[in-house]
Image (spheres, rainbow, N blue to C red):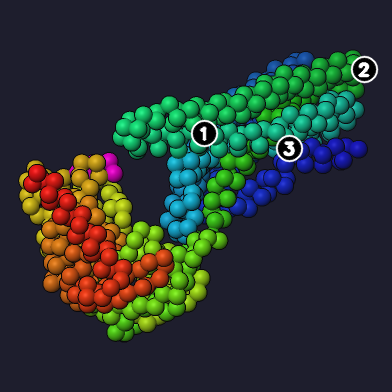
Amino acid sequence: MLIILIKKIMGSFVMIRELIAFYKRLFPFIARSRKFGIISIICALIFVGIDIGMAFFLQKIIDLALNKFYMQVALFATVACLTIILGFAINSMSIINSGKFAAYTLEELRNRIFRHLADISLPYLEQAKKGELTSRLFEACNTLHQFLKEELPSYVHQYVRAILALVILSIINIKLLLAGLIAVPVAIFISNKLSKAIGTYARSEQEEHGKSNAILLESLSGSEIIKSFNIFDHIYQRYKTAILKSVYYAKKVLFIESSIIPAAVSLGLAPLLICSIYGGYLTLNHEITLGQLIAFIQLQNYINETLKALPDFTSNVRRVTGATQIIFDNLDIRAEEQGGDTTTPSSSKAIEFCNVSFGYQSEEPVLRDICLTVEAGKTVAVVGPSGSGKSTLIKLICGQYQPTEGTVAVYGRDLKNWNIESLRGLIALVAQDPHMFPGSIEQNISCTEYTDSRKLAQAVELADLDEFISVLPDSTGSSVGERGNRLSGGQQQKVAIARSIYKDAPILLMDEATSALDANSERKILKSLQEKLGEKSMLFVTHRLSAMEHADLILVMDNGRIVQMGTHQDLLRVEGLYQELNKIQSRSNRLAIKEVTD
């Protein structure tokens, strides 16, 4: 019966299934911090020995004092005091090493999370709620850090001490032990019942926290739109709803925990009361000595402390496993394939689409049977109505998506056979959104710690930034502000163009990269790029037909297909979409000029 009871206690104490799964997932991240964890556990085990030893000293001192062996009492008391001092030192060492173990483990885990999020495919990131995702991961990491630093060493100490105390108590008096263990099955039952829902509620609370933080971030980044459209009340209502749900789940957790505390206290006092009454009876009948009874009560108290901590332990384990599940769910998201060839083949064709069709998820195809070639060193422009699939071409070339039919090749090699990082190393992209990193103009152009001043000067000149930078007090060292808010839309696009020039890649892709610039600035930049970077292969998407005068080839797209192809002058002479777009733009330009002159 005792063996069965011990097995039940162990099964409940350790919560084998959840903890084994937890440590299996965590194990790859503790290579660097393992030694600190081992030292912390060893110190905790030594401290357990000291605690058990104190009960032994207590028994000896009382029994020797009753028999008037005062010299031995003084000796044992001195050793006990020295042992206590040693215990303080061992406990401090355990705390320090557990702190290092937690810090280094979380450092490795956070680095892995950051790297993995960078490797996740673009389709997932485009659909993810980034503010909510980062908030949930941040809170989960904090929960795990607290568990590894404070709770784990404490639980190891408590539960190993309880098991050793159980063994010693069975040696002192098995009848008294069995009497004191009556409350254990009740403790196991209540702790499991009360803590079962904590993991679910805690995870829901973290999810709602993530949503509220995401809404807060959204309101700060979009404050100009929120104020101009007077939609604060709508945003605030969403935020308030998320906070209310978070509070609701937090109250659920607190309610369960508040039920655990009185149950834990009662479960801790019951065995102590039983042992005191029955132990007193055994002492009077001379079955055990008074010293053994005091030592028994001390050891029983260790078990009582563990019993009292059992509900709290199970709830904390479920809380931390729920938090780490959030982390591991994100680490389990499939990353982009990193295999493939890293060498650059020799080919006269920089980019080639062969019968390519593509659609986002299960939607209608965005591209239909696309065939095009960008010869090395040539400039190709793409034009067409909104939604015709122009930007999708750029995404496919960068390997952000895979075609559903046909093949896309760079320098004669199918994208599926390229190493994705090596492929992107050959491409300089200027996206529709000229993302600005926190820092200076120079840092946003070079995107590296060290800047080549010659390359920087060339990039600034070709992007038509030199006049603007010359009037800034810190030149290229001037800050761009939060998300580039100190720069106009056109200046941000020029910085993004300079960034692509600085990269000095053989392929330059520009997706509406000059939409915020006036026609003259756009024409000047594109002409400079063609003249100074003539050896590079360029493909740019734009709505302004006037910018395409110097392109070697123009592709006209409509409804996911290439409907016309040729030079600017050739296409103007042929009836078709390009001619229609040119007439519309010419009419718009004349109206704009008339409004200005009037």
Tell me the quarter of the picture where residue 282 sits: top right
- Give whichever of 472, 14 is nearer the camera: 472
**Can you tell which quarter of the image residue 386 is in?**
bottom left
Of badges 3 and 1, nearer the viewer stands 1
- Residue at image position (15%, 48%) is 477
Classify residue 227 as left or right of residue 115: left
Among the two numbered marks 2 and 3 on one chain, the one whose residue lies closer to the N terminus: 3
Q: Give me the disc on residue 13.
A: 3
The percent coordinates of residue 125 (x first, y second) are 46, 53
Q: CA distance from mark 2 to mark 3?
A: 35 Å
- Residue 149 is inside the magenta segment: no
Our reading of the magenta stretch's main secondary structure is loop
For the question of whether residue 67 can be seen, the reply is: no
Name the residue that disc number 2 marks.
285
**Secondary structure category for the residue under label 3:** helix
Quick one: label 3 or label 1, which is nearer the N terminus?
A: 3
Identity of the amino acid at label 2? Answer: Asn
Tell me where the magenta segment starts and ends, as one range: 479-483
Task: Give the number of the disc on residue 398.
Answer: none
Give how far across and how far down residue 218 sits, in percent.
40, 37
